[in-house]
Amino acid sequence: MSDLPEYYFRVRENGAAVFRISTENRQRRIEMDEIAVINIRNGSVKPHGDHVLTDEEHEVIADWMEERRAVLAERDLDDIHRAIDYLNLTTHWAQSRASDEDLEEVTDRLLLAMHDLRSVLVRKKADRLMAGAADAQEDNAAE
């Protein structure tokens, strides 16, 4: 039991409930005392009940939040790469295996989703190009 971490984070949709793990009792049973609830999106940390968070607990929570944000960012990017694969697989399906009825069922929704995505991507790319051009002009003016 000595290999147990001192803290446990029960992941929730927008963050986690934080527990302190203890086996310091007569039966050596695992006790989990909730000490805080955290929101990963807005960074809030709310102590549970009357518990006052120690500096160590704040540090452990901040470290976990940083690691969790990195994991979620990785997953987001992985999901996008999977979406690209699904688009390619969908193209192959539409071209080689889809029946007319299948295509009738999904074509309008796919076209709208792809149009929406294309519009956002084109706008964002234009924004990046414009920002890059403005940065280059500033650099030239500074020289």
Image (tube, rainbow, N blue to C red):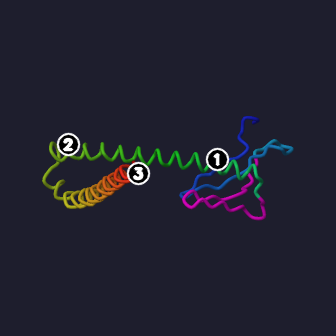
Identity of the residue furthest to the left in this view: 100
Check if mark 1's residue and mark 2's residue have beta carbons within 8 Å.
no
The residue sitting at 67% across, 51% down in the picture is 61
Residue 84, position as x, y percentages in the image: 30, 45
Residue 138 drawn in magenta: no
| 94 on left or right of 69 | left
Q: Are marks 3 and 2 in contact (CB under 8 Å)?
A: no
Disc on the earlier residue, 3 or 1: 1
Q: Position of residue 85 (x, y in %)?
A: 30, 42
Q: Amino acid at mark 2?
A: His
Mark 1, Cα crowd under 10 Å, few <14 / some 14-19 / many 20+, is: few
Residue at numbered disc 3: 142
Residue lying at 64% horizontally and 47% vertically, measured from the top left: 63
Quarter of the figure that contains the N terminus: top right
Name the mark nearer the viewer: 3 or 1.
Answer: 3
The kind of residue on which mark 3 rests is Ala
**Alpha-carbon span between mark 1 and mark 2:** 44 Å
Q: Farthest residue in the right direction?
A: 26
Question: According to the image, label 1 marks what residue?
Answer: 63
Cα separation, mark 3 vs mark 2, equals 51 Å
In the displayed structure image, the side of residue 108 where residue 121 appears, left or right: right
Q: Which residues are magenta?
A: 31-52
Q: SS for tag 3?
A: helix
Find numbered disc 2 in the image and state the secondary structure of the residue it sits on: helix
Q: Residues within 10 Å of mark 2 (few under 14, many from 20)?
A: few
Which comes sooner in the sequence, label 3 or label 2? 2
Numbered tag placed on residue 92 in the rendering: 2
Q: Tag 1's secondary structure? A: helix
The front one of 80 and 142 is 142
**Point 78% across, 46% down: residue:** 22
